[in-house]
Image (cartoon, helix red, strand yellow):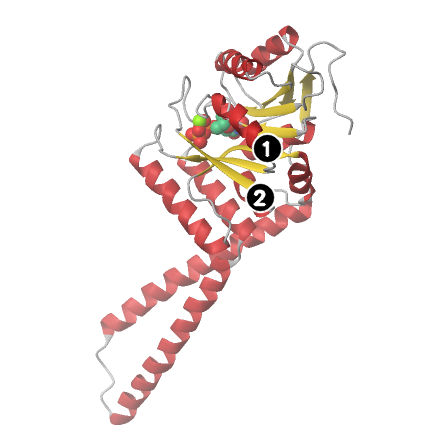
């Protein structure tokens, strides 16, 4: 291939993928060299507790286009992706899962769209295999709610995307600490293009997501993009206030009229509803407070422990 073809960086977060790393690198090398692309592969080990890092080092030593980055502990996929983006040298960057659930053969098409002028090329899901019914429903529901509340379209979105340099620079300038790649890379705008893909089954290992981590991701995503839940609390509070006035008036009138007992169920119901809502409302406010607290602390989003750049003369991005 011509020396002048622009460098494409492929960024992949890795958490306990073990031998899957070698399989992943093999598949990507096949696809990328097959398409005649000049590329680098930035593998970010997100504090794996298995031998993933050894595999990364091995791949980096064998092929100078492979570079490794080991975070000092598990910072989560979002942080790992960010680390990769900040260390990528390419004119365009592709973010892809390392478990081969995102079909690598789409990358050449992404690059083609980018060359035709798109700044952000997103792969969107045609299906949702490899997830249980609950996961599928939950994902759908979250994406729809998110899209509705924030005007950032997430329906069927994935993290599998290509960003051109200008879009990437814009993304990296965002100051948020708990970033949400799927959301922020949509929020920045720029000329976009989408490609439909089928999500493959995991080739090995199993999903790292637990209900808890997915819930956190959802809450983080929502709180970083919209204050709608806070307004909702206010609205419901207002509705209750209206109720309170009506009921209060009724109670008063009855009391004046002399028949004031009965109404026990009403009291219990009101107590339950009000109590629940108060706690929920406090919870919502707490989530936002926690985010503010996190942002104010201003800690780095990830820490790098070690890098593997293969041969010493490999391209190191100018910072
Ligand atoms: N991953 C990561 N850090 C984590 C969890 C996951 O870097 O804490 C990586 C993982 O290796 C994979 C990608 O993020 O490449 C997606 O993770 P997973 O396959 O578990 O999620 P799913 O495909 O079910 O959304
Ligand atoms: Mg996966």
- In this rendering, does residue 76 appear at all? no
Q: Is mark 1 within 8 Å of ligand 1?
A: no
Viewer-nearest residue: 168 or 38: 38
Calculate the distance from the C-alpha at mark 1 to the C-alpha at mark 2: 19 Å
Residue 269, quarter of the rendered image: bottom left
Describe residue 296's horizontal placement relative to residue 141 as left or right: right
- First in sequence, mark 1 or 2: give its number: 1
Describe residue 246's horizontal placement relative to residue 79 as left or right: left
Indicate which disc residue 114 carries: 1
Do tag 1 and tag 2 residues touch (Cβ < 8 Å)?
A: no
| Camera-side mark, 1 or 2 | 1
* Secondary structure found at label 1: helix
Q: Position of residue 192 (x, y in %)?
A: 55, 41
Q: Quadrant of the C terminus?
A: top right
Q: Residue at x 40, y 48 (%)?
A: 144
Q: Residue at x 67, y 49 (%)?
A: 296
Indicate which disc residue 184 carries: 2
Q: Residue at x 46, y 26 (%)?
A: 102
Indicate which disc residue 80 carries: none
Residue 134, quarter of the rendered image: top left
Residue 197, quarter of the rendered image: top left
Q: Is mark 2 within 8 Å of ligand 1?
A: no
* Secondary structure found at label 2: helix
- In this rendering, does residue 145 appear at all? yes
Q: Quadrant of the N terminus?
A: top right
């Amino acid at each position: 291939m011509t020396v002048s073809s622009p460098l494409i960086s492929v960024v992949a977060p890795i958490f306990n993928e073990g031998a899957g790393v070698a399989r992943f690198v093999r598949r990507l090398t096949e696809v990328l060299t097959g398409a005649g692309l000049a590329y680098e592969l930035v593998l970010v080990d997100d504090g794996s507790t298995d031998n993933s890092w050894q595999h990364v080092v091995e791949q980096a030593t064998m092929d100078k286009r492979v570079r490794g980055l080991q975070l000092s502990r598990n910072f989560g996929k979002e942080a790992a992706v960010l680390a990769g983006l900040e260390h990528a040298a390419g004119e365009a960057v592709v973010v892809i899962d390392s478990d081969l659930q995102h079909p690598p053969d789409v990358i050449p098409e992404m690059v083609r769209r980018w060359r035709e002028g798109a700044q952000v090329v997103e792969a969107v899901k045609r299906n949702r295999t490899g997830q249980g019914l609950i996961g599928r429903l939950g994902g759908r529901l979250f994406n729809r709610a998110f899209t509705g509340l924030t005007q950032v379209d997430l329906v069927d979105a994935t993290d599998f995307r290509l960003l051109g340099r200008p879009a990437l620079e814009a993304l990296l300038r965002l100051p948020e600490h708990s970033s949400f790649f799927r959301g922020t890379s949509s929020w920045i705008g720029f000329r976009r293009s989408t490609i439909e893909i089928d999500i493959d089954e995991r080739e090995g290992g199993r999903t790292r997501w637990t209900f808890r981590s997915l819930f956190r991701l959802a809450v983080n995503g929502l709180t970083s993009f919209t204050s709608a839940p806070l307004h909702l609390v206010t609205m419901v509070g207002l509705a209750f206030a209206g109720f309170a006035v009506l009921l209060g008036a009724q109670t008063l009138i009855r009391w004046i009229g002399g028949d004031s007992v009965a109404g026990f169920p009403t009291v219990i119901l009101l107590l339950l509803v009000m109590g629940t809502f108060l706690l929920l409302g406090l919870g919502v406010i707490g989530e936002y407070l926690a985010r503010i607290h996190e942002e104010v602390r201003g800690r780095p989003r990830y820490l790098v422990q070690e890098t593997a750049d293969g041969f010493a003369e490999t391209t190191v991005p100018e910072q």
